[in-house]
Amino acid sequence: MICVSLANINFQECMKAIGKAEFAEIRIDQLDLSDDQLKSLFSIKKKTVATCRPGKLDDAQRFKLLKLAINAGTGYVDIEYEANSAFRKELIELARTNHTQVIISYHNFDKTPLTKDLNDIIKQSVKWGANKVKITTMAKTPADCSRIMSLYEKNKNLIAFCMGQMGTITRVAAPLLGADFTYAALEPKLATAPGQLIVDEMMDIYKMMR
């Protein structure tokens, strides 16, 4: 399944994209939308991921918006591995109350850590209460890609792939190895991470493979 990441578009474009997509990630931090508009997006259907990365907004603002998404009915909420423990615990508790699946995500934009370190991150995330663990690292060599793909051998409920041009193939391979979904952009200029394919390209690749 392909999860379309929605960022830097207006409300009408979001509504249209969600209507077409089988699954969509709403990048709250990269969308200039009102609370009512966000509620509308997250209540359309269960297959949405609520994501609000740090940087533009502080933790109090992010918590408020992710809480809004959970209460509106989002299927998944994405919480950063590095998030403040109180922030993480309260969001997970709220998600459990609302039957929302929790994704704990680890991003490394500089490198791909050792396999042992990655497995430790996965184990800790599960211990905290993750339903899914997302691992995304920067690939600089084919060995980096192999290291990430090898995580599927011993881990379940995993979404793991590499960023960067070298890692693009891992985005395609992830669902074939066990990930419930992979991420794609609506179009190149709207990509939310380096190496992200657009949804039409990814769909064509899977069609050719079948």
Image (cartoon, helix red, strand yellow):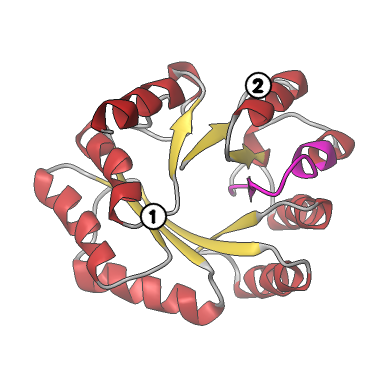
Residue displayed at 18% across by 48% down: 145
Name which quarter of the figure residue 134 lies in. bottom left
Q: Secondary structure at mark 2?
A: loop
Tell me if residue 37 comes above or below residue 155 in the rendering. Answer: above
Q: Secondary structure at mark 1?
A: loop
Residue displayed at 20% across by 67% down: 115
Depth order, front residue of 55/18? 18
Relative side of 182 to 48, left or right: left
| Residue 3 position within the rendered picture, expressed as x and y whole percent measured from the top left | 51, 39
Mark-to-mark CA distance, 2 and 1: 27 Å
Look at the image and say whether residue 40 sits in the magenta stretch. Answer: yes
In the rendered structure, which segment of residues is drawn in magenta? Answer: 39-53
Residue type at the position of mark 1: Ala
Relative side of 195 to 78, left or right: left
Residue type at the position of mark 2: Ile
Relative side of 22 to 39, left or right: left
Residue 67 can be seen in this image? yes
| Residue 126 position within the rendered picture, expressed as x and y whole percent measured from the top left | 47, 76
Residue beneath disc 2:
9
Tell me if residue 23 comes above or below residue 63 in the rendering. Answer: above
Tell me if residue 116 comes above or below residue 111 in the rendering. Answer: below
Residue beneath disc 1:
179
Depth order, front residue of 173/186? 173
Residue 161 can be seen in this image? no
Look at the image and say whether residue 65 sits in the magenta stretch. Answer: no
Say whether disc 2 or disc 1 marks the residue closer to the N-terminus: 2
Name which quarter of the figure residue 38 lies in. top right
Residue 203 has which mark?
none
